[in-house]
Image (cartoon, rainbow, N blue to C red):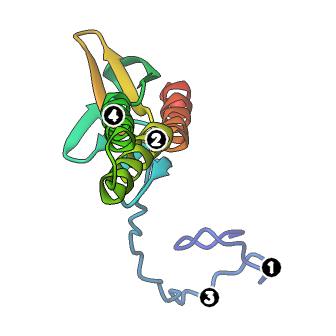
Amino acid sequence: MRFCPYCGGSLNTGGVFSGIEPTRQPQSTIAIQQTEPTYYSDEKGVRVTKTRLIIGNATYAMAHITSIKTAGKPANIIPGIILAIIGVSIILFSITQHNMAMVTVVGVVILILGILWIFLSKPTCMLQITSASAETESLISKEQAYIDQIARAVNEALIHRG
């Protein structure tokens, strides 16, 4: 015999079988969990994988997403303009009247608040998901970089979904 009848290993004894059964090693099955790659995940509840897009409590199947895009709405500066107009009006009124220094200060403060509102207002950014059935604004943020990062991850997942 050249090979062991139990394990199939080569016999280096010149072809002589000793008749002693080798000890068998217990066979066990190892479960290997296959995880899909995650393209993006954050603490706000957004997760992008090859098969799913999770935004908060909403889950979208990547197989049903046909396209995504980012969009934006301009900042609402109308309240800032109204505050600035009110501030200028108060200042002009207080100038025409005598001994109204306190009213002038109030007008200047309101004018400054209006100007700050105008310059510090940020546009609203959105991630729009299009599927065969509808287009939804699924994620809204004031941070354009955040929306762009998620859009890149979704595009990458769409490319790799197969």
Cα gap from disc 2 to disc 3, whole angstroms: 98 Å
Residue 137 placement: quadrant: top left
Q: Secondary structure at mark 2?
A: helix
Q: Residues within 10 Å of mark 2 (few under 14, many from 20)?
A: some
Q: Which residue is mark 1?
A: 14
Q: Amino acid at mark 3?
A: Ser
User: Of the residues under marks 4 and 2, which one precedes in the sequence?
Assistant: 4
Frontmost of labels 4 and 2 is 4
- Cβ atoms under marks 2 and 3 closer than 8 Å: no
- Of residue 157 and residue 11, the one placed in the foreground of this image is 157
Q: Which residue is mark 2?
A: 115
In the image, is residue 130 above or below residue 5?
Answer: above
Q: Amino acid at mark 1?
A: Gly
Q: Amino acid at mark 4?
A: Ser
Q: Residues within 10 Å of mark 4 (few under 14, many from 20)?
A: some
Q: Is residue 32 rendered to the left or right of residue 94?
A: right
Cα gap from disc 4 to disc 1, whole angstroms: 111 Å
- Of residue 39 and residue 126, the one placed in the foreground of this image is 126
Seen at 25% across and 47% down, the residue is 56
From this viewpoint, which residue is outermost toward the top? 132
In the image, is residue 32 above or below residue 69?
Answer: below
Cα gap from disc 4 to disc 3, whole angstroms: 111 Å
Q: Which residue is mark 4?
A: 89
Image coords of residue 156 (percent x, y): 56, 32
Residue 18 shows which numbered tag? Answer: 3
Image coords of residue 83 (percent x, y): 32, 38
Image coords of residue 78 (percent x, y): 33, 27
- Cβ atoms under marks 4 and 1 closer than 8 Å: no
Seen at 49% across and 89% down, the residue is 23
Q: Secondary structure at mark 3?
A: loop
In the image, is residue 48 above or below residue 8?
Answer: above
